[in-house]
Image (tube, helix red, strand yellow):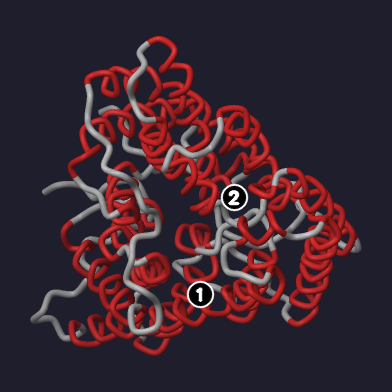
């Protein structure tokens, strides 16, 4: 009999999910469907809230375009307002509930998927508000948190086992992400490969079902359109050669990025500093954004520019450092938010810069293609989820065969290098310590 995979602790083959003929089957699958429904509704409402906040403070839902036309005082007062809101919101959440905030990955790994409901939902709403005001973090954190909390509460009502709860909470988080971005296949795979840490047929069906239901529900409120619009990029031998060189470099850069994220998360302010540090950090981001509005928001708009090849080389090089700096500054100051889209933006800048260097040696490849491949490689290397990263990029761009071969090559090489240098993903790093790093190491498959 095969031993269970060691990627996550307490893996119980007999408990998840029940077969269709088992007594608990109906209860389990109804919970999966309801999780998808709840995650889809939550993602749609949160997206509409984000758009409302962007329109209120920036007079438009495209932060980059609005901020480029906005006056310098608006940059400062909006970001200072976001800093003040962050401090007050975190202080209020701390006063309202004694529970500490728990990352979803930590909840699944350490607490069988159990999350503090009020603290998690409050943090999610706060993240939507400050990201809409221009904080340099991702919007996917909120729908993931809502989906995970919905799954956790439904698992309580259904009296599911701890292992089933772990699976359903991961499915809920993946469903929230799938609904927010319209990526049903990628969201399901992300739930298992990145959050749950294992891919198996018995787990794929619940994950895909919850993500499909959530995405279908969200399409009743949100447009069914790709997140990024790409031109048709031709495949060339030059690109294939570039991926073999760029992949290891991107893997090393991703490890540095993960460690900076871990450092920022460990050094979040406490006590009275919760009020002051976000104000200073977001005020600095606002000041920088006067000259470089591309640092504002989750990075979707600037990634779109890089993917279409319309960013000028000097700006591309500057943003390679400014974008991750703004993200780490926001995270380290206690601003809640996700890392998915900021990682894509960082990868787009990195791939674009490496592509510029390659074009000196072997010209002829559109610069936007390098940015797309760099984004996929960073996403895979930072999440340690190569399969989900490839599928997510295909769904986000509505492209399939045009860049699939070089994407597989660069994702594989970048992920191998990243996993060899650091056992933690970007999500593990947000709650890891020396003890946690050992736990992550222990649950990795051995060479034997």
In terms of depth relative to the viewer, which is nearer, 314 or 277?
A: 314
Q: Quadrant of the C terminus?
A: top left
Gap between marks 2 and 1 measured at Cα: 24 Å
Displayed quadrant of residue 200? bottom left
Q: Earlier in the sequence, mark 2 or mark 1?
A: 1
Relative to 85, residue 268 above or below: above
Q: Position of residue 56 (x, y in %)?
A: 69, 77
The residue identified by callout 2 is: 430
Residue located 72% across and 52% down the image: 330
Q: Is residue 442 visible?
A: no
Q: Position of residue 207 (x, y in %)?
A: 27, 67
Q: Is residue 111 visible?
A: yes
Q: Is residue 166 left or right of residue 105?
A: left
Determine whether label 2 and label 1 are within 8 Å by CB.
no
Local packing at callout 1 (Cα closer than 10 Å; few below 14, some 14-19, many 20+) is many
As drawn, the residue found furthest toward the top would be: 361
Residue located 43% across and 45% down the image: 383
Q: Is residue 242 left or right of residue 351?
A: left
The residue identified by callout 1 is: 47
In terms of depth relative to the viewer, which is nearer, 85 or 404?
A: 404
Q: State the SS at label 2.
A: loop
Q: Is residue 248 left or right of residue 94?
A: left
Q: Position of residue 306 (x, y in %)?
A: 48, 40
Q: Indicate which disc residue 124 carries.
A: none
As drawn, the residue found furthest toward the bottom would be: 157
Q: Position of residue 72 (x, y in %)?
A: 83, 55
Relative to 72, residue 373 above or below: above
As drawn, the residue found furthest toward the left would be: 21
Local packing at callout 2 (Cα closer than 10 Å; few below 14, some 14-19, many 20+) is many
Q: Is residue 291 left or right of residue 396?
A: right
Residue located 20% across and 66% down the image: 14
Residue located 40% across and 9% down the image: 361
């Amino acid at each position: 009999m095969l031993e269970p995979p060691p990627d996550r602790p307490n893996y119980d083959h007999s408990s998840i999910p029940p077969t269709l003929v088992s007594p608990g089957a109906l209860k389990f699958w109804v919970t999966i469907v309801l999780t998808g429904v709840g995650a889809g509704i939550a993602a749609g409402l949160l997206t509409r809230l984000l758009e409302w906040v962007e329109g209120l403070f920036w007079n438009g839902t495209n932060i980059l375009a609005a901020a480029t036309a906005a006056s310098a005082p608006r940059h400062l007062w909006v970001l200072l307002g976001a800093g003040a809101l962050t401090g007050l919101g975190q202080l209020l959440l701390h006063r309202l509930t004694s529970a500490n905030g728990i990352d979803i990955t930590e909840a699944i790994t350490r607490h069988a998927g159990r999350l503090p409901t009020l603290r998690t939902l409050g943090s999610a709403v706060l993240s939507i508000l400050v990201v809409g005001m221009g904080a340099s973090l991702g919007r996917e954190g909120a729908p993931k948190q809502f989906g995970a909390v919905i799954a956790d509460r439904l698992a309580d009502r259904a009296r599911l086992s701890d292992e089933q709860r772990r699976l359903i909470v991961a499915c809920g988080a993946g469903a929230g992400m799938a609904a927010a971005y319209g990526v049903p296949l990628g969201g399901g795979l992300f739930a298992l490969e990145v959050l749950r840490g294992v891919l198996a047929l018995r787990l794929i069906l619940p994950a895909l079902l919850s993500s499909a239901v959530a995405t279908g529900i969200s399409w009743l409120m949100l447009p069914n359109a790709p997140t990024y619009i790409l031109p048709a990029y031709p495949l060339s031998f030059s690109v294939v050669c570039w991926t073999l060189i760029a992949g290891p470099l991107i893997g090393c850069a991703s490890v540095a990025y993960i460690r900076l994220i871990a450092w920022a998360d460990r050094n979040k302010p406490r006590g009275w500093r919760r009020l002051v540090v976000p104000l200073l950090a977001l005020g600095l981001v606002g000041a920088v954004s006067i000259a470089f509005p591309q640092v504002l928001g989750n990075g979707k708009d600037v990634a779109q520019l890089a993917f279409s090849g319309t960013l000028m080389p000097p700006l591309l090089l500057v943003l390679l450092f400014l974008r991750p700096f703004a993200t780490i500054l926001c995270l380290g100051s206690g601003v809640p938010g996700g890392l998915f889209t900021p990682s894509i933006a960082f990868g787009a800048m990195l791939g674009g810069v490496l592509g510029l260097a390659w074009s000196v040696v072997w010209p002829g490849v559109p610069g936007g293609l390098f940015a797309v491949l760099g984004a996929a490689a960073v996403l895979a290397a930072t999440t340690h989820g190569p399969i989900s990263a490839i599928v997510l990029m295909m769904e986000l761009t509505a492209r399939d065969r045009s860049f699939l071969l070089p994407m597989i090559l660069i994702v594989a090489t970048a992920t191998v290098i990243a996993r060899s240098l650091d056992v933690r993903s970007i999500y593990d790093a947000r709650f890891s310590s020396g003890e946690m790093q050992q736990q992550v190491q222990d649950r990795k498959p051995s060479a034997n």
